[in-house]
Amino acid sequence: MKRKAYNRMILDDGQIVEGPVVVVMDDEERPLEWHLLLQEEPATEWIGGTYAHP
């Protein structure tokens, strides 16, 4: 699994989640779950910008 952090996320219904948010992805980079980043998390790559959730 991979963890990537973004400044914000747009959900599929158009709602904007202000972050930072962490998106947990499988090896093919399909999102499995997401959560707000509340503290530093090991092995999380900071991407920044906006993630558009499928």
Image: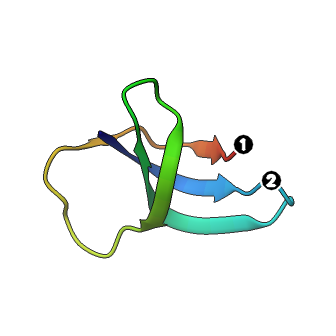
| Label 2 close to label 1 by CB (< 8 Å) | yes
Callout 1: 10 Å neighbours few (<14), some, many (20+)? Answer: few
Q: Residue at x 45, y 67 (%)?
A: 35
Residue 12 image label: 2
Find the distance from the CA under tag 2 to the CA under tag 1.
6 Å
Q: Residue furthest right?
A: 13
Position of residue 27 measured from the top left corner of the image (x, y, whole percent): 36, 27
Q: Which quadrant holds residue 20? A: bottom left
Q: Which residue is mark 1?
A: 54
Per the image, label 2 sits on a secondary structure element best described as loop
Q: Who comes first in sequence, dot 2 or dot 1?
A: 2
Q: Residue at x 36, y 68 (%)?
A: 37
Position of residue 15 measured from the top left corner of the image (x, y, whole percent): 80, 66
Position of residue 17 measured from the top left corner of the image (x, y, whole percent): 65, 67
In which quadrant will I find the C terminus? Answer: top right
Left or right of residue 54, residue 29 in this image = left
Per the image, label 1 sits on a secondary structure element best described as loop
Q: Nearer the viewer, residue 13 or 18?
A: 13
Q: Nearer the viewer, residue 43 or 19?
A: 43
Q: Residue at x 53, y 35 (%)?
A: 30
Left or right of residue 53, residue 19 in this image = left
